[in-house]
Image (spheres, grey):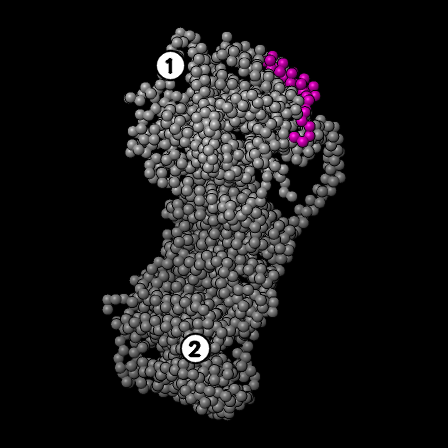
Amino acid sequence: MPGEFLDQIFVGAKRYILSFFVGAPEWLVRLVSSLITILVLIHVFLGLFALMSVLERKILARIQNRLGPNRVGPFGLLQPVADGIKMLIKEDIVPARADKVVHFLAPIMVAAPTILALGVIPYGRNMTPFAIDGGILFFFAVGSATELAVFMAGWGSNNKFSMLGAMRAIAQMVSYELPLILSVLPVVMIVGSLSPDAIVAAQSGYSLGVIPHWFVVTPWGAAGFLLFFVSGLVESNRTPFDVPEGESEIVAGHMTEYSGFKYATFFLAEYFGMFAISGLAVTLFLGGWNAPFAPLRFIPSYVWFFAKLSTLLFVFIWIRGTLPRMRVDHVMNFAWKFMLPMAFACVLAAAVWHYQARRLAGWLWSLVIVVAVYFVLSRLLDARKKFAPRTYRFAE
Amino acid sequence: MTFSLVPSLWLIPAAPLVVSLLILSLKKSRHSASAMLAIFGQLVALGFSAAAFLQTLATPGFRVVHNFTWFSFGEQSLRIGWVLDPLTAAMLIMITFVALWIFVFSVGYMAGDEHFARFFAYLSFFTAAMLGVVIANSLLLLFVCWELVGIASYLLIGFWIHKPSAAAAAKKAFITTRIGDLGFFVGLLWLYGSSGTLLFYEEGRGCLESAALLAIGPSATAIALLIFCGAVSKSGQFPLHVWLPDAMEGPTPVSALIHAATMVAAGVFLVARVYPLFSMGGVVAGGVDPGHAGLSAAGYNGVTPSLTVVVWVGVITALMASLIALAQWDIKRILAYSTVSQLGLMMVSLGVGGVAVGVMHLLAHGFFKALLFLGAGSVIHSCQHEQDIRRMGGLRGMIPITLITYAVGMMALSGVPLFFAGAWTKEEILQATAHWPGSRVPHYLMMAGVVLTALYMTRQMIYVFFGRRHAASERAHESPRVMTLPLIVLAFCTIALSLLLTPAWPWLHEYLSGARAHFETARLIQPALLVSFALVAAGIGLGILIYRNPTERDPLEAAQPALFRFLENRMWLDEIYARTVIAFSRMAARLSDWMDRHVWDGLVRTVGGIARLFGDLNKGADERGINAAVDETTFGARDLGRVISAAHSGQVQTYLGAVGVGMLALLLLYAWLG
Amino acid sequence: MVGMITALILVPLVGALCVSAARPRQARGVALGFNALSAIIAFTLWRNFDSSAAGLQLIERYAWIPALGAEYLVGIDGLSLLLVLLTSLLFPFALLAQQGSRGLCALMLVMQSALYGTFTAQNFVLWFLFYEMSLIPSFLLIKLWGGEKRAHAATKFFLYTFLGSVAMLLAFLGLYFVHGTFDFARLAELGKTGLLTSNISWLAFAGIFVGLAVKVPLFPFHTWLPDAYETAPTGVAMVLTGTLSKMGVYGFVRLLLPLFPSEMRVVGPWLLGLAVCSIIFASLAAWAQTDLKRIVAYLSINHLGYCMLGLFAITARTAEPMVETQAALSGVFMQIFNHGITAATLFYYVGLLEQRRGARGLDDFGGLMQRAPLLCGWMSIAMFSSLGLPGLNGFVGEFLIFKGSFALAASFTAVAVLGLLITAIVFLRAMQALFSGPLAGSCSAFPELRPKEKLVLLPATLLMFAIGIAPQFIFNIFNTTVVQMAQLFA
Amino acid sequence: MNTAAFLFIAILTLAGALAAAVLPRLIHAALCLVGAFLGLAGFYFLLGAEFVGLVQVFVYVGAVAVLIVFTILLTRREREKDHASDWGGAVVALAVFVGLLWAIFQTPALAVAAPGIEPLTVRAIGEVLMTDYVWPLQCVGVVLTAALIGALVLVMEEKR
Amino acid sequence: MTPTLQLFLLVSAALFCIGLLAALSRRHAIFILIGIELMLAAANLNFVAFWRFDPQPQAPTGVMVAIFAIAIAAAEAAVGLALVIAVYRHYRTTNVDQLDQLKG
C-alpha cells in the first residue's frame, strides 16, 4: 500500500529512536518510550493550543464581522507567542487571605488530568499513546478530577465570586457527567469493550463502500453524539454553558483571583479539555481515524483524525460565536429532565438496533424510539406553556 | 309435509317475549310504538300458531316432539323440549287469538295511562310465558314457564302500584299460587326421581309414556295430587281460589287475560297435559292403556283416587263460586267468581274422564270470558271507572254494541243452547258426569251449578243494563272503536265456535282426542241435552223473576240477610285464612325471631358470660398476687436500667471507641487462643 | 403456567401494600386495578383449567415446614376454580359499593388474598393459615367501618368464628398426631377406612364440624351473622355473605365429608334436621325483621341451608344411585355460586337504598316505583333471583339440590321446600313495602339509578340471567369434580 | 513488582491519610484524602487490578471527594478549624494498630511474594459480573438507587 | 526484593488505624465520615492484596468484593453526607459532641 509508509511514519520514527536502546534494561526502554510519547503529545497539543487560541479569536471576529488579531506575524498568527510572553512576565498575584497551598495547586490540578486524558485517544493507526484496556474508563476517571481542581481554585482564592463560580461549575459538571457517560454507554455496549482502539476498529467497515460504519450514522449514535457533544460543551465550560465564568455576573468565576502564568494554565486546561472531549467524540462516534469513504483510505489516518478534530473544534467556536449564555437553572433542568432521559433512550435504541441484527429494521426501530422519546420529552418540557419561577440555587 | 315446524316452535313464545323486552327498552313516552309492537308480536305468534295448527290437522293423533339438553350436570343431562299435538295447537290458537284482541282492546282502555308502554310489555311477557307453558314438553320447562306466568300476573295485578290494594292483591296472588306451586314442585321432584326424566314424550321414554308410568307405579297417585296442587292454585280452585277475585285490582284487560286465556287456563291445561299420571294408580277400570290414553277419554270410566279428588275439588269450587257470585256487587268480581265456578266445572269434567270436553270448555270459555271481561271493561270505561253494579243501571240504550256483545257472552256463559259456544260443552260435561261411575252426586250438584250460573248472570245483566239509571250511568257513552271492535270479533267467534262444538259434528272433540270427525245429526237431539237446556232456561227465568226490579237492596238479601252476608263476604274464607294460616305463620315468624334473639343468642351470651366470669376471677388474682411481684421486678429492672443507660452517652464517637476496644478485645482473645 | 395460583394469592397482597401507599383519593382505584389484575389471573386459570380431567390441577408444591408436615401445596379442581372465580367477581363489585378509605380497600384486598388461599390450599396448615387470615380483616372491617353496635357485632363475630377455628385446629392436630400428615388428599384416602378410633374420632368430628358450622353458618350456630351483616358496611357485607360464608361450605365438602364418612352417616339425619331448621327458621326470622340488611342476612342463612341440605342428604344415605348424588352436589356448587352473586347484589341494593334515604327499615320507604322505576325493577330481578324464580340463576341450583336431596331424604326435603314459600313471602312483603303504595313523604326526592351504578349492576344482572337461562358454562367448570366427588362419597 | 513504586505509593497514601486525619482545616483534610485515595488507586494498579484502580479514582476522586467538599461548603458557617483533641481516641487507634501489627507479624504465611498471573482484563471482570455476580450487581443497583433517593429526601428542604 | 503480602497488610493496617484515629478523635461529623472511608479503603486494599497473593488465583473474587465495596461505600458516603447536611440544617452544628439527644 503506497500510503502505508506515510501512515506509519511517526510510529516508525519512534521505533527508530528506540532501536538505539536495544540491550538496555527493560524499564529504561519503557521509560524512554513513554517520555517520547509524552513529549510529542504535549508539544503537538501545545501547538494546537496556540493555533487554536488565535484561530478562535479570528473566527469569532469573522462571525462578528471584524478582522480579529492581525498585527503580530502574518495574519496575526504569531499572536499567541506575544500572548505567552505577556502571560509569563506578568506578576503572580496571590490574595492575602487566600489558602496559599490550595491556591497554588489548583491550576496544576486542573491541567494535569486533561493532559492525562489526552493519553488514551487513538490518533491514528497504531498511534494510541497509552493503550489501556479500560481506556474509556480511564478518560472519565481522570476527567472527573477536574471538578475537584475547580473547587480548589474557588476555595483557595477565598473570594466570593470564585466560590460561586466554582460551585456553579461543580454543579453543572456533576450534572452533565451523567449524560456524558450514559451517552458513551451504548457505544461501549455495542462494541463490548472499553478500549478506544477496539471502538475505532469496530467502526472501520463500510456499507456499499461509501457509508462508513461510524456510530454517528445510526439513530442512537447520532442522538448519542449530540448528547455527548452538548455534555462536552458543559464539561469544558464553553458557551452557551459558561455560567461558571460568566464575566457579566461573577467576573471570571473561579479564575477571578488568578493572573499571569496560573491564569494561562487555566486557559490551557480549558483548551486541552476541549481537545480531549472532541478527540473522544471523534473516537467514539465519528469513526476515529477511519476515512469517511473507502477510496480515501490512502490518506494517512492521523490526518483524518485531526481533520475531524478540527471540525469539532470549529463547531465549538462557531457555537461560542452564535449562542447566548444560558440561565443557570435552565442548564440544570436541561441536564436532568432532557439529557438524562434521552441518554437512556439511546441505550434502549442501541439495544434494539443490536437485537434486530443491526439491519435496516433495527435502524428504523431505534429511530422510532429516539424520535418518540424526543417528542415526548420536548412536549413535556415545553417552556412556552409555563414559565418556571427563577431559582438561583447557588447565588443566595 | 316434510317441513316440520316443531323445532322452531319456540318462536311462538319468543315473539311476544322479544317484543316485551323491546318495549321495555323503548322510551316511556312511545305509546303508539309500543302498542304497535305488542300487537305485532301477537300477530306473529298467531301466525306461527296457525301454521302449527294446520300441521296438526294433517294426521289424527299428531304428536311431534323436539327435545334437547338444557344443561348437563355430573354425568347426567337435563333435557327439555317442546311438543306439538292437538292440545297444544288448540291452546296456542285460542291464547294468541284472544290475547290479540285483548291487546287491541287495551289500546283504548289504557289510553292515557302514564305507564302505557310498560303495560304492553307486561302483557306481552304474560302471553309469552303462557305460550311457553303450552308448548312445553317437559314438566320442568312447564314449571319454569308456569312460574313466569305467576310473576307476570304479579306484575300485572299490581300494575297500578300506587294503589296499596293492588299491591296487596298482587302479593296475595303470587303467594297463594306459590303455595300450590310448592306442591307442584315436590311432585315434579318426585316424578323426576322415580321416572328419571321430566320429558313428557320422548319416543316411549317420556314420563307420560307407558314404560315410565309403570316404573312410577303406586306413587303416581301422590305425584298426581301434588301436581294437582299447582293446578288448584293457578286455576283458583278451592281452597286456594282466594286470590282470583282480588286479582280484579288489575286493569280490566289483565283480568280478561288472566281469566280467559292465560293464567287460570294453565291449571286446567296442566291437568289435561299430565292426565296419564292422574289415570294411573288405584283402580284402573276399563283396561285402557294409560300410556296411550291421550285425550281420548270421553266415556272412559277409570276412577282413580287422584281423579276422584279432582272431581270433588271441582264440584266444591264450582258450587261455592256460583253461590258467592250471586251476592257480589262488583261487576268484575261477579265475573271472577263465574270464572272460578267454570274452572271447577272443567276440573270436574277432567276428573270424570271428559278430558277433551274439559279442554273444549276451556277453549270456549277463553273466548266468551274474554268477551265478558272486555265488555265489563267497556262498561266500566263508559261509567267513569265505576265498578259497582248498583250504581249502574239503564245502560241499555247508551252503549248498544257493548250490550249486544255482552249479552252474547252472557248467554254463552249461561249455556243458552244452539248458537253459543258454552252451551254444547257444558252440556257434554253434564253428560260426562252423569256417566261417572264414582258417584252421581257431582252430576246433580253440577246441574244446580248450571242453574245458579244462569241466575247470577241474569242478575248482573239486569242490574247493569236495565232498570233505573244511576249516578255513574248518567253520562255513559259508548267506548271508542278500538274497544268495541274486539268485542264484536270475540262475540262473533263465540257464536262461530259453537259450530265446531256441536255434537252433530264434534270436530274439535275428535281433533283433540285424535280421531276423525263424522257428521251425525242424530246426536243433536238427546234427552240429556234437553235437560240441560231446561236448566238454563230455569235459571234465566228465575233471574228475571227475582231481579225484575233492581234495587239497592238485593232481593235475596231481603229474603235471607244472614245467608247473603255470608255469601257477600265470600263465606268468610279470607278471614278464616287470616285468622288461622296467616296468623299462625306470622306467629311462627315472630317466634323464630324471638328465639334467635333470646334463646340461641342467649345461649351464646351465657357461655360468654361464664368465660368473662373466669376472666374476672383471673384478673383479681392477677392484680393482687402476680401483678405486685411483677411490679417489684420491673421497678428493680427500671432502676438498673437508669444506671446502665448512663453508658449511652448519645455520642457517636464513644460508641465507635467501644467498637475499637471491642476489636482489641478480639485480638486479645485471638492471642490468648493462640 | 406454574406459579399462577401463587400469583393469584400474592397479587391482592401486593395490592394491599400499594393501596396503603397510595393517596386516599386514589385508594379505591388502585384496589380496583389490582382486582382487575387478579381477575385476569383467575380467568387465565379458567382458560388453563382442563375441565375434563379429574383431580387437582396446576399444582404447586414446595416444602415449607417439613417438621410439621406442612408444605406449600396449592392446586385447583372444579370447586376451587368456581370459588376463585366467584371471589374475583365479587371483590370489585364490593369495592364499588362504597367510597372506601385507604384502610378499607387494603383490608379488603388482604381478605381477597386470604380467600384465594383458602380455596386453593390443599394442605391443612396452609389452608388454616388462610382461613384465619381472612378473619382478621373482616373483624377490622366491621369494627372500624361498621354501623352502630359495631364493636359488639365485631367482637361477637370474631369470638364465635375464632372459637370454631380453635375447635377445628385441635381436631386437626389430633389427626396429625395419629397420621402424621396434613395433606387433604391423603387424609381423604385414609378417611375411607376410618381415620381414628371411635371416641376420639367423634371428638375430632365434632371439632371440625363446629368450626365449619359456625362459618357457614348452620343453625343454631348462626347468631353472629345477622348482627355482623347488619353493622358491616355494604361492601363488607357483600363479601362476607358472598365469599366468606362459602369458606364454610367449602370446608364441609373438602374436609368433613371425605374425612368422616362413617360419622356423617350416623349423625346424618340430625344434621339434615339442622339444615332444615336453618332453612325454615331463618326464613321465618327474616319475615319478622324490618331492617332490610337483617332480612337479607337471614335469607343468607336460609340459602346456605339449602347447600347444607344437599350435602347432608348425600352423606346421610348410602347406596343411592349416583344420579342423585351428582345432582345434589352439582346443585350445591351451583347454589354456592348463585348465592354469592345474588346475595351480594341484594346487599348492594340495600346499600343503595340506605345511601339515598339514610335508613334501611321497611317502613322508611314507600312508593319508590314512582320515583325510581329502574332501581325497583333491577332490584326486583335480584330479589326474584333470590327467591328462586325460574329463568334466573337461583332456580337452577335449588332445583338440583332439591332433586338430589328429595331422592335421598324425601321427608326433610319436603319440609325444606316450605323455605321457598317463606322466602317468597319475605321478598314480596319487602317489595310491597318499598316499591308500591303511595309515595312516602321522605322519599319524594329519591334519585333514580345512576349510570355508574347501572354499570356496576349490569354484569351481575346479566350473569343472573345467563346462569338462569344457559347455565352450562358454569356446570362445565365442576362437572368432572362432581363425578369424582360423588364416587368418593359413595 | 516494583519496590520503589511501592514505597512511593505507600508514603503518599499514608501521608495523605494521616494528613486527612489530623489537619485542622477540613478542606485540607478532604484534599489530602483525595491524595490518599489516589495512592490507593496506585496500589491497585500495582496489584494488577487496573479496573479497581480506575473505579477507585472515578468513584472516590470524582464523586465522593466532590461530595465531601460540597458538604463542607454547605455546612461551613461555624468554625473551619477542628484540632484533634481527643487523646483517648488516639490511644485506642494506636492500641489497635499495635494489635494488628502484632497479629500480622505473628502470622508467618504472609511473607510470600506474588505469583505470576494472567492480567485481569475488563472483559473478564465484566463476564464474571454478569454471570456469577449478577445478583449482587442488581442488589447494589437497588442499594445505590435507594441511597440516591434517600440522600435526596434527606437534603430536600422541608416545605414551609 | 519485591513487596510481600505482609507489606500490603501493614500499609492496610496503618491506613485502618489512621481512619480509626480520624473517626475517634475529631469532632466534626465529616471527619468521622472521612475516617470511615479510610477504614473501608483499608479493607479494600486487603481484599485486593489477598486476591493477588493467593497461591492459586482463580476467580477474581477479591476484586469483585472490592468493586462492590466501593459501590456501597459511595452510597454510604452519599447518605452520610446528606445526613450531615440535614443535621446541620436542624441543629446548626456539625459537632458530634453536641448531637447527643439519644443519650440514655
Residue for point 36% across, 40% down: A364
| Residue denoted by label 1 | A15
**In front of the other: B650 or C329:** B650
Residue B211 found in image quarter: bottom left
Question: Hey, what amino acid is under mark 1?
Answer: Arg
Residue for point 37% across, 18% down: A11
Q: Which residues are magenta?
A: D76-103
For the residue labelled by badge 1, is the local secondary structure a helix, a strand or a loop?
helix
- Image-based side of C216 in relation to D131, left or right: right
**In front of the other: D138 or B618:** D138
Question: Hey, what amino acid is under mark 2?
Answer: Ser
Tell me if residue D79 is in the magenta stretch: yes
- Chain bearing tag 1 is A
The correct choice, above or below, for C440 with respect to C396 in the image is: below
The correct choice, above or below, for B641 with respect to B20 in the image is: above
Q: Quadrant of the N terminus of chain B?
A: bottom left
**In front of the other: C215 or B524:** C215
For the residue labelled by badge 2, is the local secondary structure a helix, a strand or a loop?
helix
Residue for point 50% across, 10% down: E2
| Residue denoted by label 2 | B106
Q: Position of residue C358 (x, y in %)?
A: 61, 61
Query: Local crowd at mark 1 within 10 Å, few (<14), some, or many (≥20)?
Result: few
Total numbered labels = 2
Q: Main secondary structure of the magenta part?
A: helix
Q: Position of residue B575 (x, y in %)?
A: 56, 74
Q: Position of residue E49 (x, y in %)?
A: 51, 17
- Chain bearing tag 2 is B
The correct choice, above or below, for C35 with respect to B544 in the image is: above
Residue C350 found in image quarter: bottom right
Is any atom of residue D79 visible in this view?
Answer: yes
Residue lying furthest left in this view?
A: B2
Q: Position of residue E32 (x, y in %)?
A: 63, 25
